[in-house]
Amino acid sequence: MAHTLLSIQVIPKTPNNEDSYAYVDRAIEVIQKSGVKYEVHPLETTMEGELEELLDVVCRMHEALVEAGSPSIISQIKIAHRPGGISMERLTEKYRP
């Protein structure tokens, strides 16, 4: 069982003030390719895994956005770490249909 949940909202600045959705899509692609368990939500994406692994994904997300042309990125991150194990399902099971 994973020990960490990490939720991230990336707020990339765009080179010409264009819409940032394509950049956010690029960041989510990095998560998808990483192989970690994740869920995309309207305002953030939550990943499940080990802390070092998830922080590495965050670094790769920022690198991908810079490569895509974003001159700066702000990320809001929330981390829940539980040595005994933690999961998205366990925390939200009573709210799922």
Image: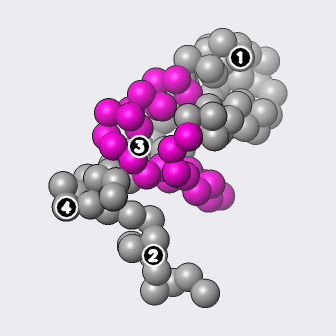
Q: Say whether disc 1 or disc 2 marks the residue closer to the N-terminus.
A: 1
**Quadrant showing the N terminus:** bottom left
For label 4, the residue is 84
Helix, strand or loop under label 2: helix
Amino acid on which disc 1 is placed: Ala
Amino acid on which disc 2 is placed: Thr
Does residue 11 appear in the picture of this structure? Answer: no
Task: Residue 77: give its label.
Answer: 3
Q: Residues within 10 Å of mark 1 (few under 14, many from 20)?
A: some
Q: Nearer the viewer, mark 1 or mark 2?
A: 2
Q: Examine the structure image and report whether residue 58 is included in the region drawn in magenta.
A: yes
Q: Say whether disc 3 or disc 1 marks the residue closer to the N-terminus.
A: 1
> How far apart are the two marked residues, 1 and 2, measured between alpha carbons?
34 Å
Q: Say whether disc 4 or disc 3 marks the residue closer to the N-terminus.
A: 3
Q: Residues within 10 Å of mark 4 (few under 14, many from 20)?
A: few
At x 44% / y 65%, what residue is drawn?
Answer: 88
Q: Are marks 3 and 1 in contact (CB under 8 Å)?
A: no
For label 1, the residue is 68
Q: Examine the structure image and report whether residue 77 is included in the region drawn in magenta.
A: no
Q: Say whether disc 2 or disc 4 marks the residue closer to the N-terminus.
A: 4
Q: Say whether disc 2 or disc 3 marks the residue closer to the N-terminus.
A: 3
> How far apart are the two marked residues, 1 and 4, measured between alpha carbons?
38 Å
> How far apart are the two marked residues, 3 and 1, measured between alpha carbons?
21 Å
Please state the extent of the stretch shown in magenta in the rendering: 35-61
